[in-house]
Amino acid sequence: MKLAVGCRITAAVLAALLAIPFVPAAPVRAAETPTVTVTSSDAASTYGQSVTFTAAVSGSSGEATGAVQFAIDGVDLGGPVSLASGSASSDTIADLTAGTHAVTGHFTSGDTNVYENADGTLTGGQVVDPAVLTVSPDAKTIPYG
């Protein structure tokens, strides 16, 4: 407290100020970094087969709120998907090329005082096998000699 020049604080005022109880502020807890676990409906699919990805967000601070943005090989798959009961599922995709694809889920926290934003990756990636091409001759199209 700053007093103007020439002002005095009386003993009674000082005693009243000192009698105000000190109430400490509640401790501020740092936001927790959650675990983001990304899974596939079929981690070893075949070209043309539909797959869906799910991200489960967990931590010790209770159920997470927010959204997950899925990406395949660094390209967003649809828009952010809101969490429901701590998990979110991507749109279904059936046009992944043959090969192994990196699949990630970026969690954006709905309450950054509880959980920080975090990322998860599908372990091993999404493996897409080539489709088997079967050719059967038709007797009507075979030239006869």
Image (cartoon, rainbow, N blue to C red):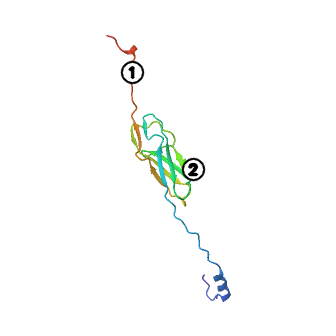
Going by the picture, which residue comes out furthest to the front?
Answer: 60
Q: Relative to 18, is 60 above or below?
A: above
The residue labelled by disc 1 is: 136
Question: Which residue is located at x 53 percent, y 65 percent?
Answer: 29
Position of the N terminus, as image quadrant, is bottom right
Going by the picture, which residue comes out furthest to the top?
Answer: 145
Q: Amino acid at mark 1?
A: Ser
The picture quadrant where one finds residue 6 is bottom right
Left-right relation of 126 to 60? left
Q: Report helix, strand or loop for mark 2.
A: loop
The residue labelled by disc 2 is: 85
Position of the C terminus, as image quadrant, is top left
Going by the picture, which residue comes out furthest to the left?
Answer: 145
Percent position of residue 44, x then y:
42, 39
Percent position of residue 41, x then y:
48, 41
Left-right relation of 68 to 124? right
Q: Residues within 10 Å of mark 2 (few under 14, many from 20)?
A: few
Percent position of residue 50, x then y:
48, 36
The answer for how far apart the CA atoms under marks 1 and 2 are is 49 Å
Question: Which residue is located at x 39 percent, y 41 percent?
Answer: 100
Q: Relative to 137, is 53 above or below?
A: below
Question: Which residue is located at x 61 percent, y 87 percent?
Answer: 5
Q: Relative to 117, is 43 above or below?
A: above
Q: Earlier in the sequence, mark 1 or mark 2?
A: 2
Q: Report helix, strand or loop for mark 1.
A: loop
